[in-house]
């Protein structure tokens, strides 16, 4: 969870620096669609973490913890 928070924080910092210094050349028309995509991806990731208590970057079945395959939420 700390990694996700650090990535989110760094995204906000770099977005502000980009706006200030004019690093990207896409124009202002991409601000709203980009913001919507960021929000939607954050909602999807949060939903996946809420549905799967074993949410991890590493795919493995933990038999000792009675882990089951999740078939609800975004995993359907």
Image: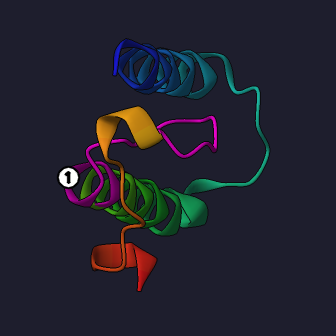
Q: Quadrant of the N terminus?
A: top left
Q: Residue at x 36, y 68 (%)?
A: 70
Q: Relative to 70, does residue 22 appear above or below in the rendering?
A: above
In this rendering, the answer to whether 24 lies above or below 35 is above
Q: What secondary structure predominates along the stretch shown in magenta? A: loop
Instruction: From the viewer's side, name the closer residue of 28 and 61.
Output: 61
Q: What span is colored magenta in the figure?
A: 48-62
Judged from the image, the secondary structure of the residue bearing numbered disc 1 is: helix
**Would you say 39 lies left or right of 51 here?**
right
Q: Is residue 59 magenta?
A: yes
Q: Quadrant of residue 21?
A: top right
Q: Which residue lies under the disc numbered 1?
A: 50
Q: Residues within 10 Å of mark 1 (few under 14, many from 20)?
A: few
- Report the coloring of the rendering: rainbow
Q: Tell me where residue 67 appears, x and y as whole percent.
A: 36, 49
Left or right: 28, with 13 as reference point:
right
Q: Residue 64's spot in the image, x, y percent?
A: 39, 33
38 and 4: which one is in front? 4
Name the residue nearer the viewer: 64 or 8.
64
- Name the residue at 29% across, 59% down: 43
Q: Tell me the residue at 69%/27% (across/down).
A: 22
């Amino acid at each position: 969870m700390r990694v996700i928070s650090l990535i989110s924080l760094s995204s906000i910092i770099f977005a502000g620096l980009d706006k200030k210094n004019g690093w990207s050349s896409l124009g202002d028309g991409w601000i709203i669609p980009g913001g919507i995509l960021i929000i939607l991806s954050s909602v999807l990731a949060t939903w996946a973490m809420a549905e799967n208590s074993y949410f991890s970057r590493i795919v493995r079945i933990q038999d000792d913890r009675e882990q089951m395959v999740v078939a609800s939420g975004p995993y359907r």
